[in-house]
Image (cartoon, grey):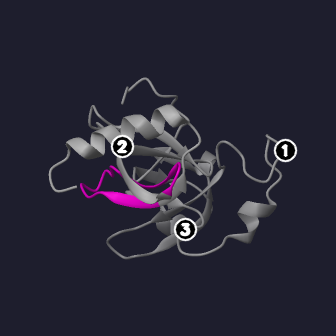
């Protein structure tokens, strides 16, 4: 995945810093997750986003987790998050799932058609995974092919 991705693009699984109103979460690396990772965030569905729709192409709110204390910032605004530079593997494919960007590694079957479990890279050196319906057939083919090349899949 190119390092030339837009600076404002935040990838789920990245490390970030926070400079918002919750000062006890300042000055520490935080792990980035979708705002709704641990349940339903009503505020995300109600937000009046710049795209004028309920499911925007890029979300403005995230969850940031301190992995050392397990403290969480729910509904953290993009403007208060700064990505910590990270070198993603060359085979990472940027995939947008429900308005959040992932550095996808490969997919495994998820129920048919374009439904897949997407395995994605994280800055914490473990593979995350999420289920989705991938919109672009080219992304499905590329990620499925990468999955077939991985041992044990």
Q: On the image, which quarter does residue 20 sit in? A: bottom right
The secondary element bearing badge 3 is classed as strand
Q: Distance between the residues labelled 2 and 1?
A: 33 Å
Tell me what residue is drawn at x 47 percent, y 28 percent: 5
Secondary structure beneath disc 2?
helix
Within-10-Å neighbours for mark 2: few <14, some 14–19, many 20+: some
To which residue does mark 1 refer?
Answer: 52
Is residue 27 at all visible to an observer of this figure? no
Q: Within 10 angstroms of label 1, few (less than 14), some, or many (20 or more) residues?
A: few
Residues at discs 2 and 1 in contact (Cβ within 8 Å)? no
Q: Nearer the viewer, mark 2 or mark 1?
A: 2
**Is residue 58 shown left or right of residue 134?**
right
Q: Where is residue 103 in the image (x, y as percent from the top left)?
A: 40, 43
For residue 92, side relative to residue 134 (left or right): left
Residue 133: mark in rendering: none
* Res 76 → quadrant: bottom right
Q: Distance between the residues labelled 3 and 1?
A: 25 Å
User: Is residue 120 part of the magenta span, yes or no?
Assistant: yes
Residue 33, percent from left and from top: 49, 60
Residues shaded magenta: 112-130
Q: Residue at x 28, y 46 (%)?
A: 147
Residue found 79% across the figure and 47% down from its top: 49
Q: Residue at x 74, y 70 (%)?
A: 42
Is 42 placed above or below 131 here?
Answer: below
How many other residues sit within 10 Å of disc 3, few (<14), some (14-19) or many (≥20)? some
Are the residues flagged by discs 2 and 3 in contact, CB closer than 8 Å? Answer: no
21 versus 146 height, above or below: below
Residue 144: mark: 2
- Residue 121 in the magenta stretch? The answer is yes
Return the x and y of residue 94 as percentages of the image width and height.
Answer: 45, 37
Left-right relation of 94 to 45: left
Q: Mark 3 points at which residue?
A: 73
């Amino acid at each position: 995945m190119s390092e030339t991705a837009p600076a404002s693009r935040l990838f789920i699984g990245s490390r970030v810093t926070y400079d918002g109103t919750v000062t006890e979460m300042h000055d520490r690396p935080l792990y980035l997750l979708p705002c709704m990772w641990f349940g339903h965030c009503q505020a995300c569905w109600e937000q009046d986003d710049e795209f004028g729709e309920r499911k925007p192409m890029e979300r403005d709110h995230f969850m940031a987790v301190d992995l050392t204390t397990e403290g969480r910032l729910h509904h953290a605004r993009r403007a208060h998050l700064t990505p910590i530079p990270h070198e993603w593997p060359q085979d990472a494919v940027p995939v947008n799932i429900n308005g959040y960007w992932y550095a996808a590694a490969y997919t495994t079957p998820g129920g048919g058609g374009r439904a897949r479990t997407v395995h994605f890279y994280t800055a914490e050196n473990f593979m995350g995974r999420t289920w989705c319906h991938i919109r672009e057939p080219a992304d499905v083919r590329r990620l499925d092919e990468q999955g077939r090349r991985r041992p044990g899949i």
